[in-house]
Image (tube, grey):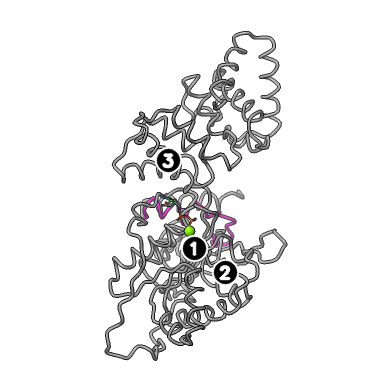
């Protein structure tokens, strides 16, 4: 049988699942794909090099046990890694890394290539025996891990941030570069890592600084002839967090000084955390040597949170502020503002302010009016999720049914109607609509749209459904 590797890996996963936390399982084991099984060698594909290192450092014992249990003492594991492509060619290629064979098992634990050994270079600025100068960290306590809601959109970034916080400078994630669009939580996560490090290692000097501020300080230092002090100050930081490094683009001198600070910190096993609005490959006007440093560690992205995560974020903010809002209002905000967390929070705050100023109860109508005003700049369309929700509410059916593969008549009908409105009211492609409605292909969506049109012409009752729904979906 040629799918034995799948079966073997599944048995391994069953044991692994019982031995690691759910979060760890999702982050580190879900993405693994078994590739083949040959001569007691199971090959698994992992998404990146750091992923492989992480498994080797943290789960080697467990992996060894399960492989031996499933394949006997001859059993071995090999990794196939999808390389990040730096060129324009977008097809991933794989390399094989011999791993977990008997030899390397005996040599465990595997050391990470970028971790720093004992022979650290002394910083000439710090006189041995003298206490370090106190540095204000500039961390905002509200931006903690506790307040950072986890979702698919941020799982990797959050997990690696947490790993860095537990072992600053001691993981392969150095630098840790968090990138993503505006308002998706980069600054929040960067603070969270700093706060957690401060909690666990109160003696470490942690510094958060925006790159704009860094650049200004540097220019001031140039003007005052104090560049040496500037450099020395930054070189004595244990954990340096620089927010929005894309701001350095085109600023050659600032890049130059940062390059030297970066090298010094990195060589001394100090942790560097960076955020940026784009991944290193897309950064323009940035020196190659700096970009290559950025790629040394891990780049983890934050993407747009899904609906559940957006609702959870709103609930967390309300809870934090001791506010309660009707569920339908929370859902509405989360449904209608779906690209940017900051904007969604802004809408929540405006809504609260409006309500208290005008002494009005916060109702769905008020929320609708406010969102219309508030989000006017971002061309807004109803989302597929919103359409699904309205359709399901109307037919009193759980949304999971609609997204399932069920072929029950009522469900098929609701699904077709949701597809029809998604086609009509959003700019989504047929394929994308299909993917949201139980993994259907574009032909199925097209067929659904035709069926709905035909039925509305022949079936009065059906037409009435559509008219009701259309009213509900059109935001006044
Ligand atoms: P960025 O730096 O990426 O532009 P921020 O970190 O400033 O974004 O985040 C914008 C707002 O959204 C902040 O108030 C932050 O607390 C909130 N936010 C973003 N993501 C999350 C999350 N996963 N959980 C809780 N709050 C979040
Ligand atoms: Mg930010």
Residue mark closest to the camera, 1 vs 2: 2
Residue at point 48% right, 76% down? 114
Give residue 116's quadrant in the image.
bottom left
Give residue 348's quadrant in the image.
top left
Looking at the picture, tell me which residue is in the foreground, 202 or 253: 253
Residue at point 31% right, 81% down? 133
Looking at the picture, tell me which residue is in the foreground, 158 or 251: 251
Residue 350, label in figure: 3
Decide if ligand 1 comes within 8 Å of the CB at mark 1. Answer: no
Query: Horizontally, is 323 left or right of 98 in the view?
Result: left
Residue 16 at what x, y percent from top left? 41, 54
- Location of residue 27 with respect to 361 vertically, above or below: below
Numbered disc total? 3
To which residue does mark 1 refer?
Answer: 75
Q: What element carries label 1?
A: loop
Residue mark closest to the camera, 3 vs 1: 3
Please report whichever mark, 3 or 1, sits nearer to the chain's N-terminal start: 1
């Amino acid at each position: 049988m040629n799918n034995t590797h799948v079966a073997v890996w599944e048995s391994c996963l069953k044991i692994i699942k019982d031995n690691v936390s759910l979060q760890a399982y999702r982050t580190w084991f879900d993405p693994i794909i078994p590739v083949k099984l040959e001569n007691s060698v199971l090959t698994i594909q992992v998404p990146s090099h750091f992923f492989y290192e992480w498994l080797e450092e943290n789960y080697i014992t467990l992996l060894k046990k399960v492989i031996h249990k499933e394949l006997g003492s001859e059993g071995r594991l090999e990794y196939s890694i999808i390389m990040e492509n730096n060129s324009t060619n977008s097809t991933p290629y794989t390399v094989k890394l011999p791993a977990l064979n008997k030899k390397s098992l005996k040599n465990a634990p595997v050391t990470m290539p970028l971790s720093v050994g004992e022979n650290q270079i002394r910083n000439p600025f710090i006189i041995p025996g003298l206490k370090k100068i106190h540095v204000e960290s500039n961390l905002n306590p509200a931006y903690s891990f506790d307040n950072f809601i986890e979702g698919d959109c941020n799982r990797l970034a959050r997990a690696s941030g947490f790993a860095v916080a537990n072992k600053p400078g001691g993981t392969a994630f150095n630098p840790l570069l968090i990138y993503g669009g505006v308002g998706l939580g980069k600054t929040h996560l960067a603070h969270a890592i700093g706060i957690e490090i401060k909690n666990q290692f109160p003696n470490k000097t942690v510094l958060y600084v925006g790159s704009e501020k860094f650049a200004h300080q540097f220019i001031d230092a140039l003007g005052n002839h104090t560049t040496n002090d500037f450099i020395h100050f930054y070189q004595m930081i244990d954990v340096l967090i620089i927010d929005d490094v894309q701001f350095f683009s085109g600023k050659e001198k600032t890049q130059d000084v940062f390059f030297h600070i970066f090298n010094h910190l990195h060589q001394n096993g100090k942790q560097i955390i960076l955020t940026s609005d784009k991944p290193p490959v897309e950064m323009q006007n940035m020196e190659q040597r700096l970009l290559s440093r950025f790629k040394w560690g891990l780049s983890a992205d934050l993407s747009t949170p899904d609906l559940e995560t957006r609702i959870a974020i709103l609930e967390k903010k309300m809870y934090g502020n001791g506010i309660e809002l009707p569920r339908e209002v929370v859902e509405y905000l989360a449904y209608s503002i779906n690209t940017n967390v900051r904007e969604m929070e802004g809408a929540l705050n405006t809504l609260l302010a409006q309500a208290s100023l005008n002494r009005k109860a916060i109702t769905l109508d008020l929320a609708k009016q406010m969102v219309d005003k508030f989000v006017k700049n971002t061309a807004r369309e109803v989302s597929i999720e919103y359409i699904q929700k309205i359709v399901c509410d109307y037919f009193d059916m759980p949304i999971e049914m609609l997204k399932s593969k069920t072929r029950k008549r009522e469900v098929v009908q609701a699904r077709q109607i949701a597809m029809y409105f998604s086609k009509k009211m959003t700019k989504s492609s047929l394929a994308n609509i299909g993917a949201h409605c139980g993994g259907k292909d574009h032909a199925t969506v097209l067929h659904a749209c035709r069926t709905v049109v035909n039925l509305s012409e022949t079936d009065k009752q059906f037409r009435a459904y559509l008219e009701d729904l259309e009213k509900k979906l059109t935001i006044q």
